[in-house]
Amino acid sequence: MRVEHAQGTCGGVENCVAVAPDYFEVDEAGLIRVVSAVIADADVERVTQAVGECPTGALRLLKDS
């Protein structure tokens, strides 16, 4: 599973960073950047929670083909 960030829709709220700081960080502009797009099996639940807490819908999960 992978996580994707839609540039231009991030509000910089940082909910995802609070839940999964090893997958998301804040860049110089105060917006979110995906640190690791590939989600480890053990982290799927936590990253799914982080994506769900994004108030702007800038994050989405993609299943590997």
Image: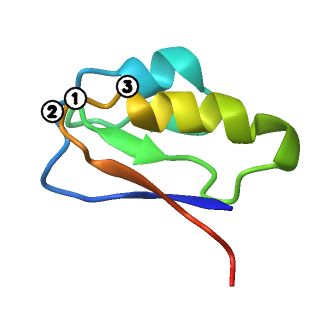
Marks 2 and 1 close (CB-CB < 8 Å): yes
- Name the front one of labels 2 and 1: 1
Q: Secondary structure at mark 3?
A: loop
Amino acid on which the number 2 mark rests in the picture: Gly
Q: Amino acid at mark 3?
A: Glu
User: In the rendered image, which quarter is residue 5 located in?
Assistant: bottom left
Residue 57: x, y in percent?
24, 44
Q: Label 3: which residue?
A: 53
Question: In the image shown, does 58 or 30 lie closer to the viewer?
Answer: 58
Eyeballing the image, is 41 above or below 31? below
Q: Is residue 47 left or right of residue 6?
A: right
* Residue at the outermost bottom position: 65
Q: Where is residue 56 drawn, in percent x and y?
A: 18, 37
Q: Quadrant of the C terminus?
A: bottom right
Residue at x-position 60% and y-position 26% = 20
**Lower sequence index among marks 2 and 3:** 2
Tag 1 and tag 3, C-beta contact below 8 Å:
yes
Residue at which label 2 appears: 11
Identify the disc placed on residue 55: 1
CA–CA distance in space, label 2 to label 1: 8 Å
